[in-house]
Amino acid sequence: MTTSEVQRVLDRAVSEGGVPGIVAEIRDGAERWFGTAGTADTATGAPRTAAERFRVGSVTKTFVATVALRLADEGRLSLDDTVEQWLPGLLHEGGGSATLRQLLGHTSGIFNYTQDQEALNRRETHTPEQLVGVAAAHPPVFAPPGTHWGYSNTNYVLAGLIIERATGGALADEITGRVAGPLGLTGTYLPNGDDPEIRGPHARHYTKLFVPGPEAPVHDATELDSSLFWAAGGMISTLGDLSAFFRALLDGQVLPADSGREMFTTTPTRDWIPNTAYGLGISSLTLPSGRRLWGMGGALFGSWTYVYGSRDGTRSVALNVNSDWTEGCWEDPIGIFDDVLHAAFRPAAHMP
């Protein structure tokens, strides 16, 4: 592999896939490569840049899981603690018996609140407790907890509430103080739910509201009330910060060995990204070559993100498109991301 192969995928993502803009960063040891195609702003034609901040969606979950594991190391909580212990009465019909480990690993069986759009549309702004209330109105997807795997954003809203109860502080401050600050991730933060802005330089975020077809209208979702996502997907970051965080996490700088083993113990996924398994806030992805990568993906209105790397952290790829649709041969941005990963991690791959 040379990075020219990756650049060709980025160019095709714009010319054939119809995305407004795409950025990628590859790190291989001490080497670093940045590639871009398309535009950050369709009105001005400004190019996308390495310094841009964007909404990272469910990549937020890796940060939240890291905070929870560090608190467990400190004895502030235990992965075996139940929802009912920390948040008494918040869940019914057995959900309260789910443990923090099951929340972080998506094996709780608790209903995913984002599947009930009718209930969510009744409010413009949501508190975490209200999001859990939407989920609590539905029976568990499976029971008892721990018997199956099922992706649920409710799990991470509950984990965020437990972190706040255990520390007495805001989740945003815990992420900054325990992860982003020590690692020097200056473009990474969890905004207040009522703050719709992206601070600092950023691309516009374009969405078709998941309506298929080239004729679907495009909306600008850059300013967004992120209270709907919070601990499940509300964070903002940059390519460089995401690369630095995942490399540090993968090579053991962030968590002690015992916590690392917890995080990287996986369960096969169902009805999620193909060829993946899920640990605690992190997933593994197996390429057609058989190589197993580690990281996370995130999708939000107008912004899709992927960050995956080798288990030792020596090589990593971070990607973002400022849209949530594709055209041509790709069903969604994940297809583009997979093509980049295949090129970047081809056997005997090297930086130019």
Image (cartoon, rainbow, N blue to C red):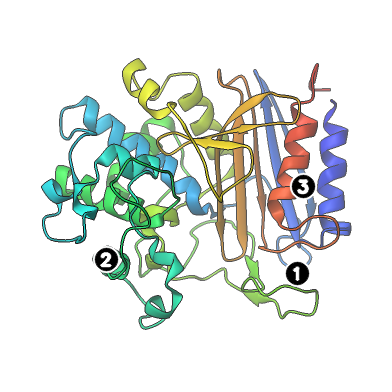
Residue 151 placement, left or right of 100:
right
* Residue marked by disc 3: 36
| In the displayed structure image, the side of residue 141 where residue 42 appears, left or right | right
For label 2, the SS is helix
Q: Foreground residue, 17 or 112? A: 112
The reply to whether residue 308 is visible in this rendering is: yes
Mark nearest the camera among 3 and 2 is: 2
Quick one: label 3, few (<14), some, or many (20+) residues within 10 Å? many
| Mark identifier at residue 42 | 1
- Callout 3–callout 1 Cβ contact below 8 Å: no
Q: CA distance from mark 2 to mark 1?
A: 41 Å
Which numbered disc, 3 or 1, marks the residue that appears first in the sequence? 3
Classify mark 2: residues with Cα within 10 Å, few (<14), some (14-19) or many (20+): many
Q: Which mark is residue 136?
A: 2
Number of marks: 3
Q: Which tag, 2 or 1, sits closer to the chain's start? A: 1
Nearest the viewer among 271 and 302 is 271
Task: Using the rendered view, name the quadrant where residue 119 is placed.
Answer: bottom left
| Location of residue 129 in the rendering, given as x and y in whole percent from the top left corner | 24, 65
Q: Horizontal and vertical percent for residue 240?
A: 58, 38
Q: Amino acid type of disc 3?
A: Thr
Question: In the rendered view of the protein, which quadrant contains the C terminus?
Answer: top right
Seen as rendered, the residue at the extreme bottom is 122
- In the image: residue 152, left or right of residue 39: left
- The earlier-in-sequence mark between 3 and 2 is 3
Question: Which quadrant is home to the N terminus?
Answer: top right
Above-or-below relation of 331 to 289: below
For the point 30% across and 32% down, the residue is 69
Whether residue 188 is visible: no
